[in-house]
Image (cartoon, grey):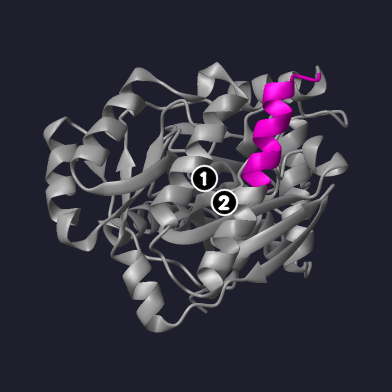
Amino acid sequence: MRSTLLHRIQDDWSNQQVSVAEQEGTIASLSRRVPLYARAPTRIDLAGGWTDLIPFAMENKGFVVNAAIDLHVYSYLTPVLDSCVSLYAVDLKEFFHPVEVSACLHGLNLPQAILSRVRLSRGCHLVSWSDVPKGSGLGASGALGIVLVGLLSAFVEKKLSPCQIVDIAADIEQKTGIPCGKQDHYAGVLGGINLLQCDGGSVKSTPLGLTEDALEELQNSLLLVYTGESHFSGSILQNVIDAYKSGNRRTHDALKALRRIANEMKQLFEIPNFSDLGQLLDENWHFQKQLHLSINTERIDELFDIGKKSGCSGGKACGAGGGGCLVFYCNADRIDSARRAFRAVGARVIPFRFDFEGLRMWSLE
C-alpha cells in the first residue's frame, strides 16, 4: 500500500510537469531536473523520554533509550521551471508555501516553518506523507523535519552531517513553539536502537548492539497499539516544562527516575536479557504519569488493564502520552491472544520492524 501511494503521487507530479514542459517547449531542460526522494524512520521511546528536554538536560544530563522502526515519514521533491516553492502534506491534505518570517517561527506549521527558514533560489514542489496515525507519539514531526531538511539541503547541493541535519531540524521545530528535545531527530537520521546522552543541546548517540537472535526475540515480544486517540504533544510538553521550572518536586523526582530507568534498560540490553523489560517499561510509565495529569487518559488505562490480563508484563505510552500509541512487552506464548484482546476493543495493533537505515535519500537518475 505504501508503494502504491508513492507511485500514484509520483505519476500525478510527473504528468503535471510534462504538461508544463510541453506548453513551454522545454522538455529537454525538464528531463535534466531529476526528482529527489527521502524517508526517515519514526521511533519507539523505550525509556528515559522527557529527559532530553531543555531545561532538564541543561541542568542534569538526560538519558534516553529508543528504537527506530520501519514506519516512515516520506517526501519527494520535483524541481520546477519557475521559482515557485510549495509542499503538499498528504496527511493534512494541505499546501504550504514559504512566508516572510522573523527569527521566531512561533505559530507556524512545521512544513511551512522549514520552507520559510531554508530559503531556496530554485523552484520545487515537495510532497510528504507518513505511515503513522496523526498524533501517534512516535516522533513523526521530528522525522518530517529530518526528511525535509535533508532533502532541501541535497537539492541545493549543500552537504550536511547527520548532526547538522538534526540541529537545524530541531531548532526550527523548537522555534515553532514545540519544546522538543532531539531524540526523535536522532532516531530519524541514524536509525537503530540507541542510548542517547543529552547534555544541554549536545547529544551523544551510542548503538546498543544486539545479536540477530536477541533482536528477533525483542521484535517478537513487543506490541505497538494505537489507542485511537490523537494527541497534541506541544501542550503536554509545555505543561511538564512549566512544572519543572516552577520547582515542582514531583516532576523533578520523576525526571530523575526516568533517567535512572534508561540506564538500567541500557544494561539490560548489554547482557542481553529481556526478562525484566516489561517491569522497566511499567516503572517508566509510572514515573511518566507523575510528570503531569494530562499524560494519562481513561482509554490508556483501559488498554493497560486489557494488556495485563492478556499476558503483557509491562508497557508505556509512546512520546508525550495523552493518547497516541502504547508499547507493550508480552510473553511470547500470549502475544497472539493479546493482539486479539486489543482489537476486540477497537484498538489498532500496528506491525513494525526495527529500522537500521535511518535517513535515506535517493534519486532515480
Q: Amino acid at mark 2?
A: Ala
On the image, numbered disc 1 is attached to which residue? 140
Image coordinates for residue 300, horizontal then vertical, percent? 35, 28
Image coordinates for residue 351, horizontal then vertical, percent? 28, 56
Q: Measured along the vertical axis of the image, is residue 100 above or below residue 312?
A: above
* Residue stretch rendered in magenta on the structure: 247-259
On the image, numbered disc 2 is attached to which residue? 143
Q: Is residue 251 magenta?
A: yes
Q: Secondary structure at mark 2?
A: helix
Q: Quadrant of residue 6?
A: bottom left
Image coordinates for residue 226, horizontal then vertical, percent? 32, 38
Q: Amino acid at mark 1?
A: Ala
Q: Quadrant of residue 79?
A: bottom right
Q: Main secondary structure of the magenta part?
A: helix
Q: Please rate how many residues cluster around mark 1, counting C-alpha atoms within 10 Å: few if below 14, some from 14 to 19, many from 20.
A: many
Instruction: Say whether marks 1 and 2 touch (CB < 8 Å).
Output: yes
Q: CA distance from mark 1 to mark 2?
A: 5 Å
| Residue at the (44%, 60%) spot, across then down | 69
Residue 301 numbered tag: none
In terms of depth relative to the viewer, which is nearer, 255 or 92? 255
Image coordinates for residue 175, horizontal then vertical, percent? 77, 33
Q: Measured along the vertical axis of the image, is residue 222 above or below residue 85?
A: below
| Residue at the (31%, 42%) spot, across then down | 225
Is 307 displayed left or right of 55 in the figure?
Answer: left
Q: Is residue 274 magenta?
A: no
Q: Measured along the vertical axis of the image, is residue 223 above or below residue 304?
A: below
Question: Residue 152, can we see it?
Answer: yes
